[in-house]
Image (cartoon, rainbow, N blue to C red):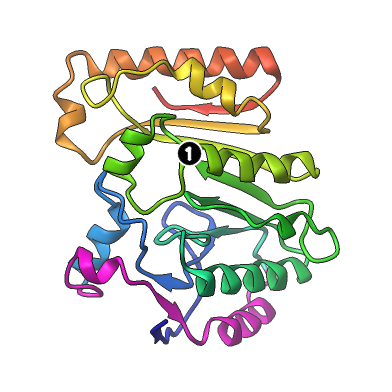
Amino acid sequence: MDTIDRKTLLNKSGLGFWCINHVQGCSHACRYPCHAFMLARRHGRVADLAEWRHPKLVGNALALLDKELRRKRAVDCVHMSLTTDPFMVGQPEVQALSLRIIERVNQSQIPCSILTKGLYPPELADEGRFSRHNTYGISLVSLDERFRVRWEPGAAPYAQRIAALQTLHDNGCRTLVHIEPYPTPNLIEQDIRALLERVAFVDHVFFGGWNYNAIAYEYPDRDAFYRKQARIVTAFCEDRGIECEAIG
């Protein structure tokens, strides 16, 4: 895999939390469109989607991380990742580097919050290597594989994604499902309750709407639809004792 060098690795995002983006690009090639890809193209980091789909590792990531963990004392949690996927499908080099980074951050007594559309490796449940304070999340907006193939063509199948997350849950890890960007009915007709039932084992649910596609804004009473879905999510989580953030 090609590599690039960066001057920094551990940075505080505009959203207020610490994050690591140790890869440029993502082979999942999500078509929502992908906000990270749009930013990378705007700033000249990639020319087009074809280049974005061929990820490049940050070759000096571990050296930067060691230096920055010694210097940045206020880091309380590290998010992976805002602009790529740490466990992208079919990219073993990315997965290997992600595991090494999580392990190194945890060695400094700092937990990680991870989000993926890929598959979590079961070794993340190894308490000898990885902190029990980590949070492992998947992005999941449907159960329909036809929808995934259209909008998340390179990502892991939904059922496999859920199964890998449940393996970590069953081994005592903290888990999360991120239901965003949730599609409007003119994109796909579905019942969010069915999706929630499939992930009822998680500790935390986040729900949000679809903001980067004109089709979602064409749906009549879009705002009312999302308010209703947020109420359903909130009620489901309250009934089962699941932590919840639902933006309607």
Magenta stretch contains residue 56 = yes
Magenta stretch contains residue 107 = no
Is 34 drawn above or below residue 212 in the view shown? below
Is 201 drawn above or below residue 80 in the view shown? above
Along the line of sight, the residue nearer the viewer: 93 or 61? 93
Whether residue 38 is visible to the viewer of this picture, yes or no, is yes
Is 141 drawn above or below residue 173 in the view shown? above
Residue of label 1 = 158
Along the line of sight, the residue nearer the viewer: 157 or 232? 157
The image shows residue 104 at horizontal and vertical percentages of 70, 73
The quarter of the picture where residue 95 lies is: bottom right
Q: Residue at x 46, y 64 (%)?
A: 90
Q: Is residue 207 left or right of residue 106?
A: left
Which residue type does callout 1 highlight?
A: Tyr
The quarter of the picture where residue 234 lies is: top right
Asked which secondary structure carries label 1, the reply is helix
Is 49 drawn above or below residue 5 in the view shown? above
Magenta segment boundaries in residue numbering: 44-73
Q: Mark 1: few, some, or many residues within 10 Å (few <14, many ≥20)?
A: many
Along the line of sight, the residue nearer the viewer: 94 or 212? 94
The image shows residue 150 at horizontal and vertical percentages of 27, 41
Q: Is residue 188 left or right of residue 144?
A: left
The image shows residue 37 at horizontal and vertical percentages of 27, 60
The image shows residue 96 at horizontal and vertical percentages of 60, 72
Number of residue marks: 1
Q: Residue at x 55, y 36 (%)?
A: 177
Give the residue furthest to the right: 128
Of the 4 image quadrants, the one containing the N terminus is bottom left
Q: Residue at x 64, y 68 (%)?
A: 99
Of the 4 image quadrants, the one containing the C terminus is top left
Q: Residue at x 18, y 27 (%)?
A: 217
Q: Is residue 205 left or right of residue 32?
A: right
